[in-house]
Amino acid sequence: MPQNFNSQISAPFVTQGSDRDLDLESTLKDLSMYDFQVDISCMSVEVAQFFEKNPLLPGAILLEAGKFIGMISRRRLLEFWIHPQAQELFLQQPLSILYSYARTTILQLPDTTPILTAMQLTLRRSPDLLAEPLVVQIASDTYKLLDVHELNLAAWQIRGIETQVRYERSQTQMIQIDKMASLGRLVDGVAHEILDPVSFIWGNLTYVSNYSQDLLKLIAAYDQELSPTPNYINHFKEEIEFDFLEEDLSKSLASIRTGAERLKKLVTSLQNFCHIDEVYPKPGDLHACLDSIVLLINSRIHGEIQIVKNYGHLPPVYCFMGQLSQVFMNIFSESIDTLLNETVRQQFHPETTKTNDKPQIEITTKVITQEATKPGCPDSRWVSISIADNGPGMSPKLQQQIIDSFSIEKRADKATSLGVSYRIITAKHGGKLNFHSQLGQGTEFQVLLPLL
């Protein structure tokens, strides 16, 4: 063998991955890789002898003057050695000659590449390259080899973890849905029990009001017929403050009527929110749905947030009203949390406050028409429900997180209320959920539902 054998070929060894178990976020640096470097001036037969002594080596990193220039795989080298003329052509030739014939496209990735991403890129290669090892860049001038079979095993392990996570998540969602359905039935039953006595009070208020007016008229008739009024009756009137009683009785009955009406609306809104949808969508009044949600959230805003309604003329929309109520509640909750947090921040840091505008949520509904994208197709009509706040707006990072929660590719991540809302609007109603946010201007969510 040549005297420069040891200087041209470094001893092969395997670098071990990290000790932590693989998960959905694991990268190539968590896998075992081969560090086998060969100078391009080395003889081809020397590299073949190294492959013979180390049957697990997938290939060799090629260097020229200490710099990385490429990779040659065991498979590619053996293909040339079994050629009938290989002994005559390459036996006494340096590796550079053979590499000029055996050079193929190399898949080179940084060690921070997720394992699943690397697997997808590997499968996109042409069929004759599927068995070729990957070149993984560890540092600016450091490269190692990753056996594609090692990558496959790791990817299948992660896919199994992902499947298990999705299964556990679906089980959790089923349990949560069952709990929410049970809670909805319970709340609906309680609301119904409350509504019965409220209806009783409401129904009898009219009669009580009429009866009280008749009694007051009767007392006035007695006063007129018994003129002058006996002293003991005048004394009794003064004792019970009859003049104030006569004036305040109608006000008290009106106050009771207002309270009963408010309680009736609140209970009805609670019933609508806990409504369990049927198998098929039904036409519903979106304005009534929005009013019910606004009535329910009044307990959170305590007059600190102004609700502005710009309702247009909407036809009944076929929908699952219970699920739409959940969507609107999620959007309102997102806006309310933002506005209340900003109010608290301004109280502690008044010097950074740029505006004195009162926190506001504006609801705008209308029917819009979108032009068809294909010739000959009719224009589409949509019901637009816009819920906009004048809060501080979202950072680009937070906006990207919301967009990621909408994507089905992030299905293994933690579910969010807006992600659930997006799936309800798109999958269950064939609609769209758009949002736009600008720092210092506020955030707007737009729900688009198709009109049949």
Image (cartoon, rainbow, N blue to C red):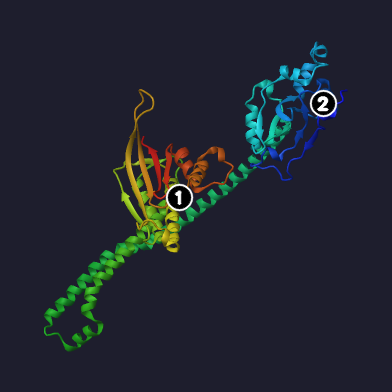
Q: Which of the two marks, 2 or 1, is nearer to us in this view?
A: 2
Is residue 23 toward the left or the right of residue 415 in the image? right
Going by the numbered disc 1, the residue's amino acid type is Asn
Is residue 148 toward the left or the right of residue 89 in the image? left
Going by the numbered disc 2, the residue's amino acid type is Phe
Point out the image quarter for the N terminus. top right
> 183 and 166: which one is in front?
166
Secondary-structure class at tag 2: helix
For the question of whether residue 372 can be seen, the reply is: yes
The residue where tag 2 is placed is 51
Q: Specify the quadrant of the image occupied by residue 358.
A: bottom left
Q: Earlier in the sequence, mark 2 or mark 1?
A: 2
- What residue lies at 52% left-to-right and 41% top-to-bottom? 404
The residue where tag 1 is placed is 330
x and y, in percent, of residue 94 in the image: 79, 19
x and y, in percent, of residue 251 in the image: 25, 70
Is disc 1 surrounded by few (<14), some (14 to 19) or many (20+) residues within 10 Å? some
Is residue 323 toward the left or the right of residue 78 in the image? left
> 315 and 394: which one is in front?
394
Mark-to-mark CA distance, 2 and 1: 62 Å
